[in-house]
Every structure is written in structure tokens, then in C-alpha cells.
Image (tube, rainbow, N blue to C red):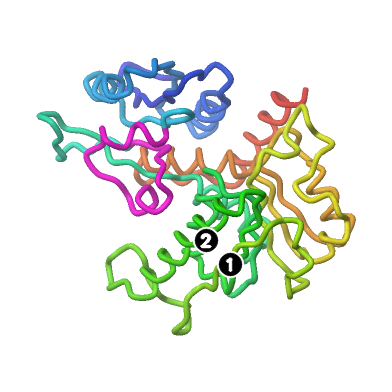
Amino acid sequence: MATGNAKVCGVIGNPVGHSLSPLMHNEIAKAMGLDYIYVPCPVAEDAVGDAVRGAYALGFAGLNVTVPYKQRVIPFLAETDESVRCIGACNTLVRLPDSKIEGYRGYKGYNTDAEGLFRAMRDQGMEIRGRDCLLIGAGGAARAAAYLLIREGAASVTVLNRSQDKAEALAADMRRMAAEKSTAPPGSGMPPEGLSGSITAVSALPPERWRKLPGDSYLAVQTTSVGMYPHVDASPIEDRDFYKKIAQAVDVIYTPSRTRFMEFTEAAGGRVCGGLDMLIYQGVAALELWNPGVKVPREVVDRVRKIMEEQLHG
């Protein structure tokens, strides 16, 4: 139970009534006995800056940021982490007592989506380093996955997206990230370790030309909304032969818990991971930023997953 000294955090967005974050964070706090409470904060489109300043004035230790404010919040931050600068979006604000912006002490912005994806994949034994990867989609979720694939040293990444212009733009950004990583000095936040003197090869391809892919053991990350409830019978690529090229796959969608993309991959012999674990772990990463020294154990993650599955699917 929270006391008068409780650490307070929350989520801002419009709308936020559907957010699972309050359930997730408060269940973690309960399981771990943390004096901590997490609240939803609906914010009007013209009040993002006021909300950030107001949260600081009210003593909030941190905020999550959801749609449509992940880009709009950035100008109101005192500092940004490398993840925000590379992905171009921010989903977590951490109070910085010694930082000043426009006359007040503010927040540092992070993006924990990539870290959430990394931890979910790690739990399933999915290694990125040295792998040939497919990135399906070129939107906001794809940018977080792209950053992770470069950060963890994928051997190659092929971006598959219906809009070739967007695919090429994302591929160009990934090449820039890879080049920066390969030349980064120590302490820059982009360590070149493990790249063996080379950088990730990045290309773009329309989905209908998937037969040009040379490999047959890809690690795939599906980041589009295709297959999300209520359109559960759809998959970004319908040809079953495509899935024979995938050894392991992650779908960031968590409603439904098993998408058509995941079913096709498993039927072709691949191993899959759904989006709920990514959702949980991005929240865990934020909670750990707000509570230095706290590490959420696996058994708590498993407990929260069960509760969230019940909430989502009954």
C-alpha cells in the first residue's frame, strides 16, 4: 500500500483509459512491496509542455508517454538518452534533480521499447548478434526494433514494407546508426564491441519480392499492425512459403496473443515470441529507471503476465 512518502509516476497520452500500464506497474509494486504508485494522466493536445512541467512541480519521479505524444514531448525535456535520439521518440521521462530548462529542473527522456524487445527476445533465447534479420514494417515500432538490431550487432537487416519510400528511409537511418556505432569512441553510448570491424548490412525490399531473400534461417521482427484485433485473420505476408525462411520471430502485437504471423511461422517450423512480453519489459525497464537499485525478478514478470493475460483475454 502506498504511503504519504510514495514515489509517484504515471502515463500521459490522449486517450489513456485503455492503457494497461497502471495495472502492470501497480501489480509489480504490490508484488515487490514498493512504496510506489502509478496513475493515468489524460493530457490535451495543446497541454503537453504544461503537463511535463506540472508533473515536475507535483513531484512525479517519472512519466511514461504514449500516443500521440512520443515525439511532441521531446522539446520539453532537459536531456535525452541515445535511444531517443536514434529512435526519434520518447516513452519514458526520468526526473533529473540537477538539470535545468527554461528556469525549472526537468526530466531526461528515454525510449524503453527497444530494451523491452531485447529482454523479451532474450527470455526466448533469441540472439541478435551476428544474425541475418528481417524487419517487417517501417513505422514507429519498427524504428525501436531497428535501433535494437543495430545496437546488438545484427549481421544484416532487410526492411520489408509496403511503402518502398518509407522502407528506404528507415534503411538509410539504420546505415547511419551502424556507421556511427562502428566509429563511436569509448563512453559515447554506441560501443562498437563485437562488430569484428564491420557494420550491419542494411537493405530494403517490397514484401511481394520476398523470394529474393538469399537466406533461410532469419530472425524476424514483425512491427506492423496487420493481424491486430479485430483483424485477426490477416498477416503482413500471406504466402506460407515465406515463413520457411524464418527460424525465429517476434510479433510486437499482443492482441491477440497469437497472431496469424506467429501461427504461420510455427507451422513452418520456426520459434515465436508475442508482443505481451515486450510490453511488460518496456514497463519494467521504466520502473527500474525510476527506482535505482530495483531489479524486477522473473517470477514477478511471470505473475504480472498472467494477470495481464486475464485482463486482455478473460
The residue where tag 2 is placed is 171
| Residue located at (75% from left, 47% from top) | 236
The C terminus - image quarter: top right
Residue contact between numbered discs 2 and 1, judged by CB atoms under 8 Å = yes
How dense is the environment of label 2, judged by Cα within 10 Å: few (below 14), some, or many (20 and up)? many
Confirm whether the magenta stretch covers residue 73: yes
Going from the N terminus, do you reach mark 2 or mark 1 first?
A: 2
Which of the numbered marks, if any, corresponds to residue 203? 1
| Residue located at (67% from left, 29% from top) | 307
Q: Position of residue 226 (x, y in %)?
A: 72, 39
Tell me if residue 274 comes above or below residue 125 in the rendering: above
Q: Which one is in front, 221 or 165?
A: 165
Q: Position of residue 53 (x, y in %)?
A: 24, 23
Where is residue 44, by image quadrant?
Answer: top left
Q: Position of residue 54 (x, y in %)?
A: 26, 19
Residues in magenta, as a range: 70-93
The amino acid pointed to by label 1 is Ser
